[in-house]
Amino acid sequence: MAQTKKHPVKKAVVKAPAIKNGLDSASYAFGTSMATNLKNNGVTALNYELFIQGLKDTFTGKTPLMSNEKTQTAINNLFAGASKKKYAGIIAEGKTFLENNKKTAGVKTTASGLQYIVLKEGSGTHPAATDTVTAHYKGTLLSGKQFDSSYDRNEPLALPLNRVIPGWTEGIQLMQPGAKYKFFIPYNLAYGERGAGQDIPPYSTLIFEVELLKISGK
């Protein structure tokens, strides 16, 4: 019995929609702009069918498939996961550093994970979390890159302890006027998953040298 020759099935070629007018141009531009922003935030793919459905439902006034609360939760979860993936190297670097650093002579670790070493003892009372203090400081990344220094400005900083990063709020309460400490602050006690400006990337473990000059009270 003769066998019939099978021919490969040709796949249909999907042509990109043509851009014919200003609305077409703007529509495509919005798509590329949104995708670029998402990629810059670590999002590499979406369910495109549901993405388009969300746009259509919103523009046409159709009842959405999700509540506002669930929508926001889904977006937050997506960005949080993408951010952790994007900055996995920085997270791992910080964790390894702190694990090794806590074994260094003189370094103490608190229950929260804050690490510190006393460079110079002070005397007197300890500040409370609601006090304002005056301090000199220098901040660096694990790479040694300095991102801020009151010493360079020759001007100490007056700051309320309940309005600074958690690592400072906790750490400076351990000090007395005249003391100088070196703090090693994990990202969750520093600027967290957002970072700060262009100098402090998200999830950065930070090192601060802090000199407590005086306690100004509440």
Image: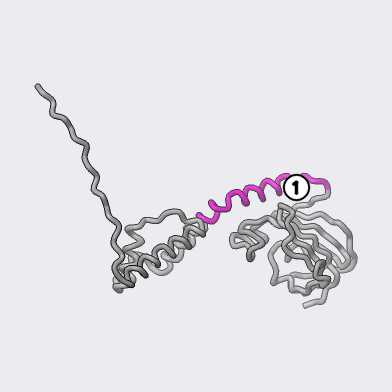
Which of 109 and 53 lies nearest the eye of the viewer? 53
| Residue 146 rendering spot, x and y as whole percentages | 74, 59
State which quarter of the image contains the C terminus. bottom right
Residue 92 counted in the magenta span: yes
Q: Provide the residue designation for mark 1.
A: 101
Most extreme residue toward the left, as rendered? 1
Q: Residue at x 37, y 56 (%)?
A: 47
Residue 15 falls left or right of residue 47 = left
Most extreme residue toward the top, as rendered? 1
Which of 175 and 15 lies nearest the eye of the viewer? 15
Q: Which residues are magenta?
A: 81-105
- Please say whether residue 74 is visible from this viewpoint: no
- Image quadrant in which you'd find residue 200: bottom right
Which of 109 and 183 lies nearest the eye of the viewer? 183
| Mark 1 element type | helix
State which quarter of the image contains the N terminus. top left
Q: Residue at x 68, y 46 (%)?
A: 96
| Residue 139 rendering spot, x and y as whole percentages | 75, 61
| Residue 175 rendering spot, x and y as whole percentages | 82, 63
